[in-house]
Image (cartoon, rainbow, N blue to C red):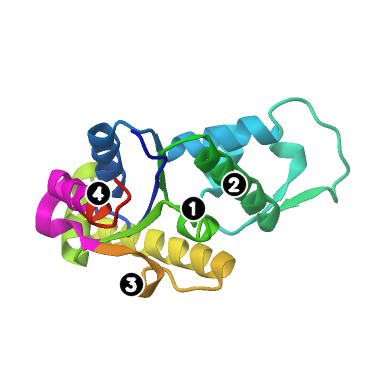
Amino acid sequence: MEKNIIITIGRQFGCGGKNIAEVLGKKLGIPVFDNELIIKAAQESGFSAEFFERSDEKRRFFSLTSIFAGSYSSDSENFMSDKGLFKIQCETIRSIAEQGSAIIVGRCSDYVLRERGNTLSIFLTSPIEERIRRVAERMGISLEKAEETVEKQDSGREEYYNYYTFGNWGVASNYDLCIDSSKAGIEGTADIIIEFAKISGLL
C-alpha cells in the first residue's frame, strides 16, 4: 500500500469481528493485530503471553511473582496494576501504528490512536439473536449458554473501554463508521469498510 493507514475495530462479542478483520487484512494486504498484539506486548514488556491472555480486555490486579516469563524474585507486595498493563498495551499499539499500515482489533485502539492521522475507527455490531446463534455454533454450546457468554463478554468489554477512555463503548459518535455485520456478512462488511476508506480518502 502506498499510504500508511491504521484501521481500528471495536466489536460486540459474536458479530464476527475477528473474521472480518482477517478478510479485510487479506484484501488490503496489511497485517491484523488481535492475539498477536498480546504476544507482542508480552515480548516487549518481559511478561508471559499467558498473563496478557488472562487479562485481555478485563480490569484486574496481578501479582508480578506469577507473571514474569523468566524467574523472578519479589516480596508479596510487588504488583502490576491493571493501569500498568493498559499502559504497556498502549505503547505497543502506538509502536505498531508507527511501523506501518495495520488493522488493530479491540483494546481501546480507537481511543489510543485518536490523535493520529490516517486512522479509521470502526465499530461492528449485530442483533443479539444473531450473535447468540453464531457463538453457540462456534463454541458448540447451547443457546442459553451462548446468551450468557455474549452478555458476559460484552459487559467486560464495555467496562474495560469506559474505564480507560472515559467514554462510552459502542456509541456511534466515538467511531468513524458503525456497521451491522449481519446485513452484509463477513465478506460484504469488509468490502463496506474498504469502500468507506476510499470515500474518506484514506485509500
Mark 3 highlights which residue?
172
Place of residue 66 in the rendered image (x, y in percent of width and height, measured from the top left): 71, 38
The question of residue 15 being in magenta is answered with no
Nearest to N terminus: mark 2 or mark 3: 2
Which sits in the foreground, 30 or 80? 30
Nearest to N terminus: mark 1 or mark 2: 2
Q: Amino acid at mark 1?
A: Arg
Mark 4 highlights which residue?
16
Which sits in the foreground, 120 or 82? 120
Mark 1 highlights which residue?
107
Place of residue 168 in the rendered image (x, y in percent of width and height, measured from the top left): 45, 73
Q: CA distance from mark 1 to mark 3?
A: 17 Å
**Residue plotted at (62% across, 53% down):** 86
- Image quadrant holding the N terminus, namely top left
Q: Amino acid at mark 4?
A: Gly
67 relative to 121 in the view: left or right: right
Q: Amino acid at mark 3?
A: Ala
Mark 2 highlights which residue?
89
Which sits in the foreground, 16 or 134? 16
